[in-house]
Image (tube, rainbow, N blue to C red):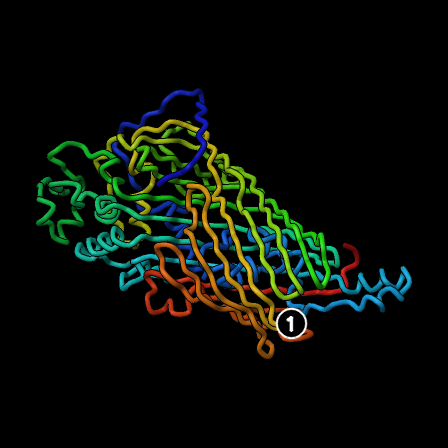
């Protein structure tokens, strides 16, 4: 995985190297294992709204993001667009005829507040959804035979797996005649996995993977890997390789792996610099403070890996004295800025430019060399819990690395540029096009994409839809339907990243949900 990170190697806990040369013990269950964190996606249903499902499901989020949704996308929209409110132009002559007190009362009556309680989006792209049996949601163990494990490993190696869960716990915005401001609190879970064939088999089969030539069974007999049966697989204890102990590089060559969880506290404002019927110009600025609990990446090109977790993330680090955050203390901190500008002509045509995620994260964890030998897998247990339990065993740092160097690392955030434009169709419609692309090689960066679509009102519903093209992922058809009748404060929304996603769920399965409230008569700006 190409990180693009600026690294600052700082010895921790005395600055020495720590070795764990004994065989790695892979427990079958943990309080909250790394991949069971990903499993929680299934029970929950952002954040990075570039994932393909923003919280309102729009193909052009830089145009249609409203209120606090504009944080991290286009903060200038806080000045130009009022959530679920029709645009009205003031009668200048009538306004000038009012006295100062009356004009102030009018401005106060037009102020608006917009808030949400719990919103979210989930996006999953994985071959494991295509007919492969996963962990039973009701706690019953799923039995996997050897052929099914090998088939799952093959699919993992062919098709990449991307998981993203975004949760906005609370959001709030305030809008007046001169602009608006907003804040929000969000959680973001990301995982990206594109393993080599060897790594996929190592995770799914353990000592029975093709990485080894023979398997030592619990009865002391040795069986060739190719002739292993289901009954013998349950007795597998150790893999034997005639060419010597395999290196981690042998597993990761040709693949990549990364996982991350961060919580962000964001705030931003939009300011109307010029606001007339002929010309409108707005500026927006936003900032986010990040607290990270989990980070894991593998950089095959430089033959190194890095991991930083707190205890609540549910995985162990290799070095005993490496910095491992407590349940409450994060393992990483970061700050990012968003800058945007928006122009509008004649109240119809508009265009905007935004740059998002200008910043970095500072993580305390440990680094590994991909030249370290892999454990002999003594103590490997045949866990029948499902795919994610098996992946947790095969991909945890303690499963792959025997030595580690405590390290503090500064990692660039995925900076992204967003350019869009379009036209208004009265007070009921908007058409637009948007282009977005990454500008650095940061971890978990989203691909270049282009969206074309629109928004309209129909009875008591707001409908957004269109097409979004993403590099290496093809064309999607996102759609959002928001129930927002006139004179009702509450709005319910449901979005999908691809209206036809149910035809190929292993490649495109994504949903978003939203509940917001629009309230007028704010007391002060």
Q: Quadrant of the N terminus?
A: top left
Q: Position of residue 179 (x, y in %)?
A: 71, 55
Position of 319 relative to 333 (above/below): above
Q: Position of residue 189 (x, y in %)?
A: 45, 50
The number of discs equals 1
Q: Position of residue 187 (x, y in %)?
A: 52, 50
Q: Which residue is mark 1?
A: 427
Position of 214 relative to 108 (above/below): above
- Is residue 200 visible in this depiction of the protein? yes
Residue positioned 85% across, 69% down in the render: 94
Residue positioned 41% across, 27% down in the render: 406
* Residue 61 shown left or right of residue 386 in the figure: right
Q: Nearer the viewer, residue 65 or 490?
A: 65
- Is residue 329 visible in this depiction of the protein? no
Q: Mark 1: give few (<14), some (14-19) or many (20+) Cα within 10 Å.
A: few
* Residue 284 shown left or right of residue 252 in the figure: right
């Amino acid at each position: 995985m190409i990180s693009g990170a600026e690294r600052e190697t700082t010895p921790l806990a005395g600055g020495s190297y720590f070795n764990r040369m004994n065989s790695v013990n892979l427990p079958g269950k943990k309080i909250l294992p790394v991949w069971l964190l990903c499993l929680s996606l299934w029970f929950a249903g952002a954040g990075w709204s570039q994932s393909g499902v923003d919280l309102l499901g729009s193909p052009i989020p830089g145009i249609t993001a409203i209120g606090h949704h504009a944080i991290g996308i286009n903060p200038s929209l806080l000045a130009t667009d009022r959530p679920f409110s029709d645009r009205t132009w003031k009668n200048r002559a009538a306004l000038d005829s009012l006295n100062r007190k009356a004009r102030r009362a009018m401005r106060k009556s037009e102020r608006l507040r917009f808030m949400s309680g719990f919103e979210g989006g989930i996006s999953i792209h994985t071959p494991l959804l295509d007919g492969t049996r996963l962990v039973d949601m009701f706690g019953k163990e799923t039995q996997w035979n050897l052929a099914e494990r090998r088939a799952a490993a093959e699919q993992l190696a062919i098709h990449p797996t991307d998981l993203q869960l975004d949760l906005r716990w609370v959001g709030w915005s305030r809008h007046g005649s001169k602009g608006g401001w907003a804040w929000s609190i969000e959680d973001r879970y990301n995982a990206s996995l594109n393993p080599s064939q060897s790594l996929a088999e190592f995770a799914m089969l353990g000592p029975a993977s093709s990485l080894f030539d023979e398997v030592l069974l619990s009865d002391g007999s040795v069986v060739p890997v190719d002739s292993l049966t289901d009954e013998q697989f349950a007795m597998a204890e150790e893999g034997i390789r005639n060419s010597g102990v395999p290196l981690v590089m042998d597993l990761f060559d040709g693949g990549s792996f990364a996982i991350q969880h961060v919580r962000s506290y964001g705030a931003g404002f939009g300011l109307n610099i010029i606001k007339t019927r002929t010309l409108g110009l707005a500026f927006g600025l936003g900032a986010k403070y990040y607290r990270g609990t989990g980070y894991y990446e593998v950089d095959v090109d430089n033959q190194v890996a890095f991991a930083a977790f707190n205890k609540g993330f549910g995985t162990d680090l290799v070095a005993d004295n490496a910095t491992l955050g407590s349940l409450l203390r994060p393992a990483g901190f970061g700050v990012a800025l968003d800058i945007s500008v928006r122009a509008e002509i004649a109240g119809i045509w508009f265009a905007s430019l935004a740059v998002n995620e200008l910043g970095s994260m500072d993580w305390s964890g440990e680094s590994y060399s991909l030249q370290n030998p892999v454990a002999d897998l003594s103590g490997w247990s045949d866990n029948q819990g499902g795919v994610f339990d098996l992946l947790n065993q095969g991909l945890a740092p303690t499963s792959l690395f025997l030595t580690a160097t405590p390290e503090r690392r500064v990692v660039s955030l995925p900076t992204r540029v967003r350019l869009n434009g379009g036209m208004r169709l009265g007070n009921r419609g908007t058409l637009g096009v948007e282009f977005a692309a990454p500008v650095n090689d940061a971890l978990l960066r989203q691909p270049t994409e282009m969206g074309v679509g629109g928004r309209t009102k129909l009875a008591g519903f707001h409908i957004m839809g269109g097409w979004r093209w993403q590099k290496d992922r093809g064309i999607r058809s996102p759609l959002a339907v928001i129930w927002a009748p006139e004179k009702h404060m509450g709005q319910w929304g449901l979005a999908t990243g691809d209206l036809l996603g149910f035809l190929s769920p292993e490649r495109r399965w994504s949903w978003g949900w939203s509940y917001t409230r629009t309230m007028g008569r704010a007391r002060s700006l």
